[in-house]
Amino acid sequence: PLVTTGELVADAREKGRGVAAFNVITLEHAEAIAAGAEQAGRDAVLQISENAVKFHGGHLAPIAAAAAAVAGASSARLSLHLDHVESVELMRAAHPAGFSSVMFDASKLGYGENVEATADAVRWGRERGIWIEAELGRVGGKAGEAPLDAHAPGVRTDPAEATAYVRDTGVDALAVAVGSSHAMTERTAALDHELIAALRDAVPVPLVLHGSSGVPDEEIRRAVASGMVKINVGTALNTAFSGAVRGFLDSDSTAVDPRKYIAPGRDAMAATVAGFLGLLG
Ligand code: G3H
Ligand code: ZN
């Protein structure tokens, strides 16, 4: 069934577990996430990023409706989240499109401007019952962005600043920079577990790990154990999908019907989803 992100995150946190959020680009991503969640017997968040909406010609409604329908038909508890939103106009479209949560991403702005823009987003969300996640610090590797030095000052999230940020914005969850980076195709990221524990103690809201595709299994387990709650995974699904499609087409140069090669891609994504869901406690 389609449920709210707020309830999935609250439930995971209460049980000392993590809840995974997977990026949806196509209908088949949503189907694979539902299948993986059903296999694993776990909840999941279906998240659609601003970049994915741009891929669909700027139209939010069709892919959102597809993901919501997949969630509604599934036996797993699934929610719909709008991810990495920089456009206020897109954020506002989340409500009529059926999203229960939004990550409003003002992390490129300076601290003061980030607080101001995010507090406005939270006010908008409160009036509509929409759960708001925001980012403090810089998780690098976003599409179209220059690479970041993960150790440069102002990149990792500072616990004292995080306390003030959550108090002054009123966000429901905080995405933090603790060593992961977006769009990694190899799982070699090392997380700062001391910083995760310090952030968990410093802020009253659940923490969100972005760029989890590049984080090894054991590091994800430890991160959840030390207080990370929402675990965002995107690239790993695409790596699995592309590998399976490439393998199929390499072995069959006459295939034309997309169902022939998309099906193994979708199965590979479902297996990847189930694998991540098994790490969350
Ligand atoms: O918000 C989405 C996630 O942070 C996904 O990152 O593609 O590196 O797994 P990833
Ligand atoms: Zn992210």
Image (cartoon, rainbow, N blue to C red):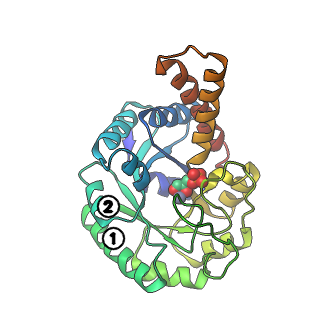
Q: Percent x, y for residue 43?
A: 51, 43
Q: State whether residue 47 is above or below residue 241.
A: below
User: Residue drawn at (67%, 72%), measured in percent from left and top?
Assistant: 149
Between 249 and 19, which is closer to the camera in this rendering? 249
Q: Provide residue 168's location: percent of width, then percent of height.
A: 42, 83
Which image quarter holds the N terminus?
A: top left
User: Where ligand 1 lies, by image quadrant?
Assistant: bottom right
Q: In percent of the image, x 60 and y 53: which residue is there? A: 183
Tell which circle, 2 or 1, labels the residue nearer the N-terminal end: 2
Q: For mark 1, what is the residue? A: 121
Q: Residue furthest top?
A: 254
Residue 251's place in the image compared with 109, above or below, is: above
Q: Amino acid at mark 1?
A: Ala
Foreground residue among 230 and 105: 105
The three-letter amino acid code for the residue at tag 2 is Met
Evaluate if marks 2 and 1 touch, with contact meaning CB atoms under 8 Å apart.
Answer: yes
Q: Is residue 14 visible?
A: no
Tell me the element at label 2: helix
Residue hosting label 2: 91
Confirm or reject: label 2 Cβ below 8 Å from ligand 1: no
Mark toward the viewer: 2 or 1: 2
**Rendered position, 21 above or below 157:** above
* Residue 279 coordinates in the image, percent (x, y): 67, 46
The total of numbered circles placed on residues is 2
> Residue at 53% across / 32% down in the picture?
38
How crowded pointer 2 is (Cα within 10 Å; few <14, some 14-19, many 20+) is rated as many
